[in-house]
Amino acid sequence: MAALATPVDVVYSCTAQPGGVASNVPFQMELKTPAVQPSPSATVTVTWEIRQPTATPSQLLATAAITPSSAVVAEGTVTPSGSPVPSTAVTGGATASPYMTVSPNSPMPLPTMTFLVRPTATGTVALKGGGFSLKVNGVAWYECVPGASGGPSVNLVVGTGTPSTSSTPSTTSTPTTTPPTPTPTPTKTTATPKQTKTSYVTVVETPTKRSSKTPKAGANTGSGGEMGPDGRMFVLVGSALILAAGAGGLAMRRRGATRG
């Protein structure tokens, strides 16, 4: 028997806690087994999906407000039958937090439960869902039990790890190949030379002031003006000697003429 390809309506009698009135709810339920046949002694995960009925009047409603921070817990049992697995009920469950606030008398969220079974030999194992309970923040809200026809069921084929023909194959997605990340080439970093501050000082050479003195009553040209008082003294003395020599020469001439 293959796993349910689509959910089917399974009627459960749910009683509000504590001591509420029971009501029949035709849930849409589905038990799912792996797409690959498990090998003996391998742990197998079985999921149990529970969805609200499509008809609004038959839906299971929240008895109080459920906030996004609330924890909604579903707990149930699945009973196996067959030689590879002992016929002991397996307990499973799930916890979910709604993404938004659920108002009172609105359809309450129903978590998908998971169960772990471990077949010991090859063969076919029949799995059948039993009762389940719903709790909000640790407080029991509903107890649900299946009707006369029982809960959802599925067959688990235990083989050698080959694809199973008795379970619903899962959609195979093409793996995306991620190209390898190129290793960056190390870049040689050249240290920036430290800047040197250069100061320039401009030196202006001031020429020595040269003055020209012009002697009094002397010529205004030539370098005679540079001659000091001592130089003038030599000139005066020389001039006096020349005049004295001239006067002496004239006196000698006059004496010679007188004698003659």
Image (spheres, helix red, strand yellow):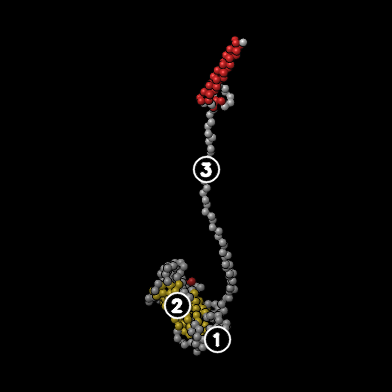
Q: Give the residue at x 52% y 46%.
A: 199
**Mark 3 vs mark 1: which is more N-terminal?**
1
Q: Toward the viewer: 99 or 122? A: 122
Q: Residue furthest front?
A: 259
Of residues 103 and 238, which is closer to you in this image? 238
Q: Helix, strand, or loop for circle 3?
A: loop
Task: Name the residue located 56 percent from the left edge and 61 percent from the top edge.
Answer: 188
| Marker disc for residue 159 | 1
Q: Element under label 2?
A: strand
- Is residue 240 visible from the viewing direction of this image? yes
Label 3, residues with CA under 10 Å away: few <14, some 14-19, many ≥20: few
Q: Position of residue 25 (x, y in %)?
A: 47, 76
Q: Which of the 4 image quarters holds residue 221?
A: top right
Name the spot of residue 29 as percent of width and height, x first: 50, 78
Disc 3: which residue? 201
Which quadrant of the figure contains the N terminus?
bottom right
Residue type highlighted by circle 1? Gly
